[in-house]
Image (tube, helix red, strand yellow):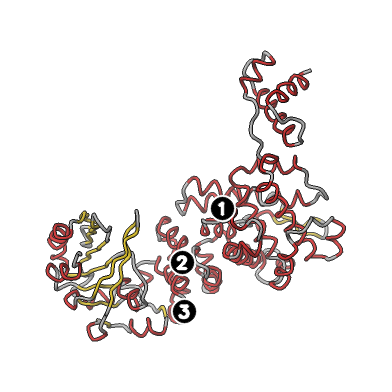
């Protein structure tokens, strides 16, 4: 068995474990890497010698800061060696972001290192049997860990790296910690600096924040101290838009409510859709992506708000919203696939409401819906659920969820119970669409019976857009039960040709 602690002590006895690995180990949480700091001039030779002793790949990450990374070939243990940022260990620790990350533990104290290999991924590590007498703490980090507080290490931390402001909320969500008042006030003071952070770094922090079940409460706190709209200035106009409809906070209040409902839905699929929870689970795996769609879904409402008679309307806000969301997502370096999915969800999120304006949703109507939306159909229905659920109280939502799987109410029945009836009917529309999608897939995604070549041969037609129109007509005929075999499809196209 590899004596990792022993080898580290033999090669770099002057070094210290620092930052996340010490804090996580005190919290009995595993970490994805071992962060170690030592004098800058010692780093290159130490990295090479450890690479040889541990049979690890060795990379120089940053020559100026003296950052080297090792990854062992067998267990995929990741070790990051970094030179002191300052003259010595004390200066290094005092320049770190938060007090709970400013703890160090001597390599020479030889703590037990427990390694948990992960297939295909970096191993998880934890330091065991830490002794408090060896912990180096210049800024109250031990107290912060004990009291579960995130406290800025000094007033300059956010000026030195503005992303740390977002990291405070992400850490609070992941660890269940609270952010100290002086840290929140410092964030409020420095919030405008967040635009200096690289988009891909912001994206990574948001992904980790949104992956938690405490993203909503931290998003609220971010808004209270000005970081949310400093990060997303496009959301600020929502705050005073449509207050007559949504109350104080306007569209932004609604946006955060939808985000809250999306977070609830992704954590409680079985309560919202008991019959289809298992089938929906694979679609709902990417929680951060769906929460971002919820955050941006009404981004264009202020820009499209118009008073028509005695009503406030937002004509085409979904289409304009998709374009505005695209700009935001590009700024944050989202992948093309994720960008397309989110924009499709936003650009079409009124489609189920349009379907709900009919007393009957036909198989043909459902087919066109799923055909047009493609891969975005199911995710967009989840966004619509969160949107509809935001208009009712928690108690009303619990009552609605019990009835949402029942046969769809008529429009007249829904109107009798005002807002809650309208919401229930919309939920029943979603349940009906999921029923058609999962229980009768041939009705909404029919398997093609004939090809374009079959049509050209049967009707003696040259290639043209007309072939696609005929294929679509066959698909609709399949949905309506008029065509079930290739022979029937060929007879059908000859009939419509006549």
Binning the other alpha carbons within 10 Å of mark 3 as few (below 14), some (14 to 19) or many (20 upward) gives some
* Residue at the spot 68% in from the left edge and 16% down from the top edge: 458
* Residue at the spot 44% in from the left edge and 67% down from the top edge: 166
Q: Observer-nearest residue: 420 or 234?
A: 420
Q: Which mark is residue 13?
A: none
Q: Which mark is residue 178?
A: 3
Q: Observer-nearest residue: 285 or 242?
A: 285
Quadrant where the image shows the N terminus: bottom left
Alpha-carbon distance for marks 3 and 1? 32 Å
Q: Earlier in the sequence, mark 1 or mark 2?
A: 2
Task: Judge from the rendering whether residue 128 lies leftward or rightward of residue 152; answer left or right.
Answer: left
Quadrant where the image shows the C terminus: top right
Task: Judge from the rendering whether residue 397 lies leftward or rightward of residue 142; answer left or right.
Answer: right
Q: Observer-nearest residue: 482 or 338?
A: 482
**Which residue is under mark 1?**
283
Q: Quadrant of residue 101?
A: bottom left
* Residue at the spot 14% in from the left edge and 73% down from the top edge: 14
Circle 3 — which element? Answer: strand
Binning the other alpha carbons within 10 Å of mark 2 as few (below 14), some (14 to 19) or many (20 upward) gives some
Viewer can see residue 154:
no
Alpha-carbon distance for marks 3 and 2? 22 Å
Binning the other alpha carbons within 10 Å of mark 1 as few (below 14), some (14 to 19) or many (20 upward) gives some
């Amino acid at each position: 068995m590899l004596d990792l602690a022993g080898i580290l002590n033999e090669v770099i006895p002057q070094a210290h474990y620092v930052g996340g690995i010490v804090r996580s180990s005190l919290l009995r949480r595993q970490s994805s890497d071992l962060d170690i700091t030592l004098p800058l001039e010692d780093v290159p030779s130490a990295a090479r010698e450890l690479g040889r002793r541990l049979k690890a790949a060795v990379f120089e990450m940053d020559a100026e800061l003296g950052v080297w990374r090792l990854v062992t070939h067998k267990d995929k243990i990741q070790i990051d060696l970094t030179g002191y940022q300052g003259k010595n260990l004390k200066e290094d620790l005092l320049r770190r972001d938060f007090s709970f990350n400013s703890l160090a533990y001597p390599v020479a104290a030889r703590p037990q290192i427990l390694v948990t290999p992960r297939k295909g991924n970096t191993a998880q590590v934890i330091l065991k049997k830490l002794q408090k007498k060896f912990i180096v703490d210049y800024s109250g980090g031990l107290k912060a860990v004990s009291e579960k507080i995130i406290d800025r290490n000094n007033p300059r931390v956010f000026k030195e790296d503005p992303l740390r402001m977002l990291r405070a909320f992400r850490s609070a969500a992941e660890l269940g910690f609270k952010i100290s008042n002086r840290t929140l006030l410092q964030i409020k003071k420095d919030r405008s600096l967040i635009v200096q952070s690289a988009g891909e770094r912001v994206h990574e922090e948001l992904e980790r924040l949104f992956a938690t079940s405490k993203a909503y409460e931290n998003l609220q706190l971010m808004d209270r101290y000005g970081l949310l709209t400093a990060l997303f200035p496009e959301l600020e106009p929502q705050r005073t838009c449509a207050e007559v409809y949504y109350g104080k906070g306007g569209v932004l209040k609604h946006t955060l409510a939808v985000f809250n409902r999306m977070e609830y839905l992704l954590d409680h699929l079985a309560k919202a859709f008991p019959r289809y929870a298992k089938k929906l689970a694979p679609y709902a795996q990417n929680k951060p992506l769906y929460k971002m769609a919820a955050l941006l879904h009404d981004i264009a409402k202020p820009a499209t708000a118009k008073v028509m008679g005695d009503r406030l309307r937002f004509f085409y806000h979904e289409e304009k919203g998709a374009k505005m969301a695209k700009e935001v997502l590009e700024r944050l370096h989202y992948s093309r696939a994720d960008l397309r999915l989110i924009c499709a969800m936003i650009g079409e999120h009124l489609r189920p409401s349009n379907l709900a304006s009919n007393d009957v949703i036909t198989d043909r109507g459902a087919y066109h819906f799923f055909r047009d939306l493609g891969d975005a159909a199911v995710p967009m229905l989840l966004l619509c659920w969160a949107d509809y659920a935001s208009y009712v109280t928690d108690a009303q939502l619990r009552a609605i969820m019990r009835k949402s799987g029942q046969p769809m109410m008529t429009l007249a029945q829904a109107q009798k119970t005002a807002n809650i009836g309208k919401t229930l009917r919309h939920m029943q529309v979603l349940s009906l669409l999921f029923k058609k999608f999962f229980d009768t897939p041939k009705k909404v995604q029919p398997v093609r019976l004939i090809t374009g070549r079959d049509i050209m041969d049967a009707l003696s037609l040259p290639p043209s857009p007309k072939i696609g129109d005929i294929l679509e007509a066959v698909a609709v005929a399949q949905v309506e039960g008029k065509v079930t075999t290739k022979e029937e499809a060929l007879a059908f196209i000859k009939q419509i040709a006549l």
